[in-house]
Amino acid sequence: MEQLSISEVARQTGLRASAIRYYEQMRILAPARRVSGQRRYDFAAVHQLAVLRRAQQAGFTLDEIRQLFFGFDKSTPVSARWRKIAERKLLELDARMEEIQSMKDLIHGLQRCCRCETVDQCGAGILRGGLPQARSPKPAIQRHRGRAR
Amino acid sequence: MEQLSISEVARQTGLRASAIRYYEQMRILAPARRVSGQRRYDFAAVHQLAVLRRAQQAGFTLDEIRQLFFGFDKSTPVSARWRKIAERKLLELDARMEEIQSMKDLIHGLQRCCRCETVDQCGAGILRGGLPQARSPKPAIQRHRGRAR
DNA sequence: GTAGAACTTCAAGCCGACTTGAACGCAAGC
DNA sequence: GCTTGCGTTCAAGTCGGCTTGAAGTTCTAC
């Protein structure tokens, strides 16, 4: 059973050693065995990190990936875990798509309709009905949940 | 010429007073006149903030909005300013759309093809060719520019 | 034995768009 | 004169996903 150092794992996964340490700290990777203080990994860790990267590419957060790894009954196969968390994520991605689409609509509307000379005119126009209005009546850009009122 | 207090402007724009102070600090709003230390606004400020909000809804950053307000020759009408910065933004939004689309493709691929029991299996599969692979050969999720190597 | 590469931990920094808190100022009404 | 309710400034905190730096330890090669 081969033992890899952290930089060897980093090389094989394309990650930085600091990222791997960070994942351990965030409890996404189980603490590695130590040999006089230094981390030693086997190939399972490389595989786990490959899954992590793929999950990130698919838009999952580290919290969600921790869920994927540790948030299920041990008997639940990974394929079922994926399907479970993928459902929520697809809804979220659709929401993000629509958000972006409504931004695009807004910009196209501006490009088509704005004839304003000054910012003042433009603002007055927006207050007087918003004109193009796009499709979504919602605030659209709010990731900082302290925002609404 | 009416003089509005900061909380009055906040009420009319739906923003928080702290946000309005922040915009001034970030030099997106010109410093307001002071009456014994307190800010006083006229309606132009309300209009300007309406434009700011609309621009945010359309996905512009505060940096870009500062550009919109102050980054052009004074003779350039606002409609032309919009069109100029909108061009770049549309490209960016298209890129974000594709990014999200490739995430969705990745997740659909997982849902269709993953039969793995364990994370280890799954990771080994990913390393052995990545399977669905989606469309984009690019890293996909990288906003932290320190990331690549 | 010793240089230097690789490893460790811990704390702090980065990005963007704010909010929150502390400590204070100023005006009006009682 | 005192409270209430605005307003002010400045510093620090938030979120996520790391990186960077300092200071110290251990491994490796000569």
Image (tube, coloured by chain):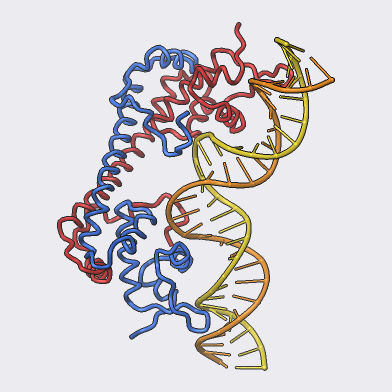
Chain colours: A blue, B red, C yellow, D orange
Of residue A149 and residue D22, the one placed in the foreground of this image is A149
Tell me the quarter of the picture where residue B24 sits.
Answer: top right
Residue that appears at 45% across and 20% down: B78
Tell me the quarter of the picture where residue B56 sits.
Answer: top left
Residue that appears at 23% across and 64% down: A76
Is residue A19 placed above or below A108 in the rendered structure?
below
Expressed as whole percent of the image width and height from the top left, the position of residue B138 reads 31, 55
Of residue B22 and residue A118, the one placed in the foreground of this image is B22
- From the viewer's perspective, tell me whether residue B69 is left or right of residue A44: right
Expressed as whole percent of the image width and height from the top left, the position of residue B48 reads 51, 20
Is residue B35 placed above or below B104 in the rendered structure?
above
Is residue A125 placed above or below B26 in the rendered structure?
above
**Most distant residue in the left direction:** B112
Tell me the quarter of the picture where residue B5 sits.
Answer: top right
Residue that appears at 60% across and 14% down: B4
Expressed as whole percent of the image width and height from the top left, the position of residue B66 reads 52, 30
- From the viewer's perspective, tell me whether residue A26 is left or right of residue A75: right
**Most distant residue in the top direction:** B1
Of residue B33 and residue B13, the one placed in the foreground of this image is B13
Q: How many tags in the picture? A: 0
Expressed as whole percent of the image width and height from the top left, the position of residue A91 reads 26, 43
Of residue A62 and residue A129, the one placed in the foreground of this image is A62
The quarter in which the N terminus of chain A is drawn is bottom left
- From the viewer's perspective, tell me whether residue B119 is left or right of residue B46: left
